[in-house]
C-alpha cells in the first residue's frame, strides 16, 4: 500500500486530469503486448522533465515502484507494473523539440510516436532508420528503453546506433544529460548506450538526441516465393554469407503468409512454403546491381518466383502486410507466445528447422517470421494460456527453442528485450558473474530498486 | 611502495621474461603519445585471460594500481600509469581467434594491431571500418578502450558501433562476457558499450567480438584545394548539410599541408590555404553520382582544383600523407598539444575561424586538421613544454578552444578520449551531477579504484 500522503503529493504534481486512480482506469494500464498483467496503484501523465523529477523524488522517498510506459507495445512485459506502484505514462511528453537536418539530428521527447517522427522528417528528405513493427504506435521512449530494431536495421543498425545523447531523470529525481548533438563523442563513459535497452530499470529518459539520415535516392522491394522453407532459409544465409547487405531481408513461412492474407486480402502467395520480402536502397544503379546479385543467389537456392513491387503503393502494401503479422496472429487465439531469438546468419536454416521440429513435437501451430538477414527469428505460437495442458506444451517448446538458439551461438532477444518474458533464460547465454554484474550496476544506479522492479535485473 | 611479496607473486604468474622491473625497462612504459610521464613499478605482459585474472586478483588484494597498455599511442595520456603500480601490456595477447565472414564477425585478442586485422580480412573481401590515424601500430584493445574513430568513421561509425561482444576481467579478477556473435542482441544491459571508451577504468578487455563488413565494390579519392580556409570549411558544412555522406571528408590547412610535404615530398599543394581529402565508396555508378554532387558543392564554395586519384598507389600516397600528420607535427617541437574537439557540421566554419583567431591571439603556430565531415577538429600546436612562458600561452589557447567548442554545442573529444588531458574541462559539457554519476558507476565496478587511477573519473 502506498502512503496516502505520497499519493496526494504525486497528484498535486500532475493535477487531477493527468492522474488515473480508479479501478477502470488502472485496468487499462495493467498489461502490454505480453500476456501477463499487474495492477498499478496510480497512473501519472507527466508533461515536463521537472514533473518527472518531482514524481521520482517522492517515489524515491517512499520507495514506491515506478514503471515507465509509452504506447504499451512491449512484447516482453517491460511496461507491466509487476510490483504495482506508479505507472509513468509518457504519452503527453510527445513534442519534437528540434529538427536539424544540416547537422543531422533531432531532439524529441519520449512520447513521440516513431511514425510521427518519420512523417516530420520526410519533407526534409530525411528519415530515422529504426522501424520496429509497432512503429505506427510505439514511442521513441519505448524504442530507446528496449533498443528497438525493425526490418531495415539489417542495413542501418538498431536504436542504440542512433542515440547521440539523452536527458535522464534518475531514481533520486536528479536530472543528468549524457552525450551531445555530435556524431562523434567520447567525452566520458558512453552512458546513453547503457540506458538504451535498460527497459526502464535505470532511469527515465525525458528527451533524446537522435541521429537521422538522408533518404536514399531509390528503393526497391522484392517479393520472392519458395516451395520449401529450408531453401528459403538457405537463400538468406547465402545472400548474407556472400557479403550482400540489403536494407531488409524478411522471411515468412506458409502459416504466417496465410494468416496475414486471410485478414489483409492483398493477394499474398498463400501456396508458397516460404517467402522473402527483400528491400534494397541507394543510387538507382547500385540497387539494380544489388538486385542482380541477390537474384542469382535466390535462383541458386530454388526460388520459384521473384516479383519487384512496381509502385510505391505496391511496396507499402507488402510492408503493411508484413507489419500486420503480430497483430493478426494475436487475434488467432487468447494468448500469443512470440519469440525473438537471434542466431548467426549461417545458422538460420538449422534454427528454422529446429523451430518447426519443436513445434511439431509439441503439436503446436507455429508461424515463423524473421528479420532473417540479421538472424532475428520470431516464431509465433498462438495458444490459450488458460488451457493448462496446451500452455504446458507451449512452455516446453519455448524452452527448447531458447536452448537451441543458445547452442548455435545465438542469443535470447534481438529487439524485444528480456522484461518478464525471458529473465529465467538469461543463464543460457550469460554466466552467473555476468548476471551479477548487471545487478551491481542496477544497485549502484537505483539503490532502492524502485525502477521497474520485478524484471530481469 | 608495492609489497615485495605481491611483486613476487605477480612475477610468478607471467614468468621472468614477461616482467619488466629495471629502471631502464620501466622508463619505456612511463609515457604514451601525450606529453606527461609517470613511472610504473612493474610492467607485465600477460599471454592469457587467466594470467590477467590472476594478476588482477593480486592487485585487488593489495590495492595496486593497474593501467592497461596496447601500443601506447594514446594522445590523451590514457595509458600513462599516473599512480604507478602495474602496467599491463597486452602486446603479447595478439591472436586473431576467429574470422567468420559468413556471419560477419571476428574474434580478436586486445593486442592485435588494427592494420594486421585489416590485412587478415582483405583476402576474404572484408574490412573492419574504424581506422584511427595510428592504425599501423595501435591495437584493437586500445581502440576499444578509447572508442577510436578515424577518417572513414564519417560514413561507417566508430569502434563502439562494431563491438558485438567482449570478455572482460574485472578489478576483482572475475571474468565476465557480454554480448554475443549476433549483430542484434538486447539480452540484458548493453555493457560492452559501457566498457568501450572507458579508458581502462572499469575492466581489462581480454577478447572482443567485432562486426566486419564486405569491402565496397569501388572507392574514389579526391584531393581538393582552396585559396581560402573559410571556404574550405564552408564547403564541408555545405556537403554534409545537403545530406551527402562520403566515407571521409578530411580538412587540412596550409600549415598542415606544408609540414607534411616538407617530410613526405609527394607533391602536395603547398600553396593552397585549405585542402579537402574526400573519399566515396560503393557501386561504381553510385560513386560517380556522389562525386558529381560533391563537385557541385565544391564549385559553389570556390574550390580551386579537384583531382581524383587515378591509381591505388596515388590513393594510398594521399592517405599516408594524411596519416603522417600527427607524427610529422610531433617532430616539429619538443611537445605537441593536439585538440580533438567536435562541433555540429554547420558550425565547422565558425569553429575553424575561432581556432585560427585564438592561435593568432596567443602568437602560436597552429595546424588545423579535421575529420571535418563529422565536425571532429584536431588543431595541433607545436610548442616547448619547458618554455614556461610559451606553454602558458598554449594552455590559454587550449582553454579558449575548448570553451569555444562547448559554446557551439560541441564536445571535448571525438576519438582521443579524456584521460589526463581533458579531465579538467569536463564541466564545460557535463553537469556536476552527470560527472558524479560516472563516479557512481566507477565506484560500483572498481570499488578500490585500482583501474587506471588518476584519470578523468
Image (cartoon, coloured by chain):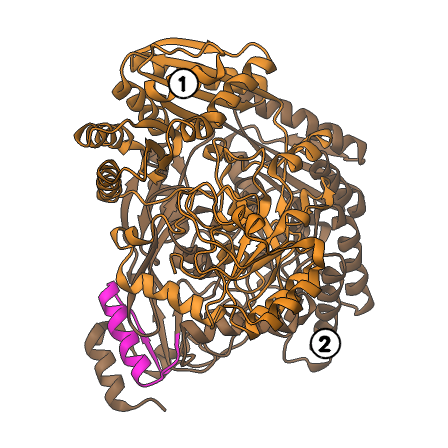
Chain colours: A orange, B brown
**Nearest the eye: B76 or A89:** A89
Give the Cα separation between the discs numbered 2 and 1.
Answer: 62 Å
Q: Which class describes the residues within 10 Å of circle 2: few (<14), some (14-19), or many (20+)?
A: some
Residue B213 at x, y percent in the picture? 42, 36
Q: Are marks 2 and 1 on the same chain?
A: no
| Whether residue A285 is situated above or below residue A171 in the rendered picture | above
Q: Is residue A432 left or right of residue B36?
A: left
**Nearest the eye: B110 or A122:** A122
Residue B350 at x, y percent in the picture? 79, 52
Residue A137 at x, y percent in the picture? 58, 36
Q: Nearer the viewer, mark 2 or mark 1?
A: 1
Secondary-structure class at tag 1: helix
The image's mark for residue A50 is none
Residue B448 at x, y percent in the picture? 40, 81
Q: Quadrant of residue B307?
A: top right
* Residue that appears at 66% across and 49% down: A109
Q: Quadrant of residue A350?
A: top left
Task: Assign the N terminus of chain B to one quadrant of the image.
Answer: bottom left
First to last magenta residue range: B41-66
List the residue tagged with mark 2.
B390
User: Is residue B60 part of the magenta span, yes or no?
Assistant: yes
Q: Quadrant of residue A454?
A: bottom left
Secondary-structure class at tag 2: helix
Q: Is residue B62 left or right of residue B323?
A: left
Q: How many marks?
A: 2
* Residue that appears at 31% across and 80% down: B59
Q: Chain of mark 1?
A: A
User: Is residue B441 part of the magenta span, yes or no?
Assistant: no
List the residue tagged with mark 1.
A294
Amino acid at each position: 500500500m502506498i502512503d496516502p500522503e505520497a499519493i496526494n503529493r504525486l497528484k498535486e504534481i500532475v493535477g487531477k486530469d493527468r492522474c488515473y486512480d480508479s479501478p477502470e482506469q488502472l485496468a487499462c494500464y495493467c498489461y502490454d503486448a505480453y500476456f501477463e498483467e499487474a495492477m498499478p496503484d496510480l497512473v501519472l501523465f507527466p508533461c515536463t522533465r521537472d514533473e518527472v523529477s518531482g514524481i521520482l523524488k517522492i517515489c524515491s522517498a517512499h520507495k514506491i515502484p515506478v514503471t515507465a510506459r509509452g504506447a504499451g507495445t512491449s512484447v516482453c512485459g517491460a511496461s507491466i507494473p509487476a510490483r504495482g506502484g506508479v505507472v509513468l505514462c509518457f504519452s503527453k511528453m510527445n513534442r519534437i523539440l528540434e529538427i536539424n537536418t544540416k547537422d543531422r539530428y533531432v531532439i524529441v521527447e519520449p512520447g513521440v510516436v516513431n511514425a510521427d517522427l518519420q512523417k516530420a522528417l520526410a519533407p526534409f528528405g530525411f528519415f530515422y532508420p529504426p522501424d520496429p513493427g509497432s512503429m505506427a504506435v510505439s514511442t521513441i521512449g519505448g524504442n530507446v528503453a528496449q533498443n528497438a530494431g525493425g526490418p531495415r536495421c539489417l542495413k542501418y543498425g538498431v536504436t542504440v546506433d542512433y542515440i547521440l545523447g539523452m536527458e535522464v531523470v534518475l531514481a533520486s529525481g536528479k536530472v543528468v544529460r549524457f552525450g551531445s548533438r555530435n556524431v562523434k563523442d567520447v567525452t566520458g563513459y558512453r552512458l546513453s548506450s547503457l540506458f538504451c535497452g535498460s527497459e526502464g530499470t535505470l532511469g527515465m529518459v525525458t528527451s533524446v538526441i537522435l541521429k537521422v539520415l538522408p533518404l536514399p535516392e531509390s528503393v526497391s522491394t522484392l517479393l520472392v516465393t519458395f516451395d520449401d522453407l529450408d531453401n528459403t532459409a538457405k537463400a538468406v544465409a547465402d545472400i548474407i554469407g556472400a557479403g550482400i547487405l540489403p536494407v531488409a531481408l524478411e522471411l515468412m513461412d506458409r502459416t504466417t503468409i496465410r494468416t496475414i492474407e486471410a485478414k489483409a486480402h492483398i493477394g499474398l502467395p498463400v501456396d508458397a512454403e516460404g517467402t522473402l520480402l527483400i528491400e534494397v536502397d541507394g543510387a538507382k544503379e547500385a540497387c539494380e546491381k544489388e538486385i542482380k546479385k541477390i537474384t542469382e543467389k535466390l535462383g541458386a537456392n530454388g526460388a520459384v518466383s521473384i516479383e519487384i513491387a512496381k509502385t510505391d503503393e505496391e511496396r507499402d502494401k507488402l510492408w503493411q502486410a508484413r507489419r500486420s503479422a503480430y497483430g493478426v496472429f494475436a487475434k488467432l487465439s487468447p494468448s500469443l507466445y512470440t519469440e525473438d531469438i537471434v542466431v548467426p546468419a549461417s545458422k538460420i536454416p538449422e534454427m528454422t528447422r529446429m523451430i518447426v521440429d519443436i513445434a511439431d513435437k509439441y503439436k503446436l501451430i507455429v508461424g515463423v517470421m524473421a528479420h532473417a538477414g540479421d538472424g532475428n527469428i520470431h516464431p509465433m505460437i498462438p495458444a490459450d494460456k488458460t488451457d493448462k495442458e496446451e500452455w504446458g506444451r507451449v512452455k516446453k517448446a519455448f524452452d527448447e527453442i531458447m536452448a537451441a538458439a543458445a547452442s548455435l551461438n545465438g542469443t535470447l532477444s534481438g529487439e524485444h528485450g528480456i522484461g518478464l518474458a525471458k529473465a529465467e533464460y538469461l543463464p543460457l547465454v550469460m554466466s552467473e558473474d555476468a548476471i551479477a554484474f548487471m545487478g551491481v550496476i542496477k544497485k549502484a544506479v537505483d539503490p532502492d530498486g524502485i525502477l521497474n522492479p520485478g524484471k530481469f535485473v
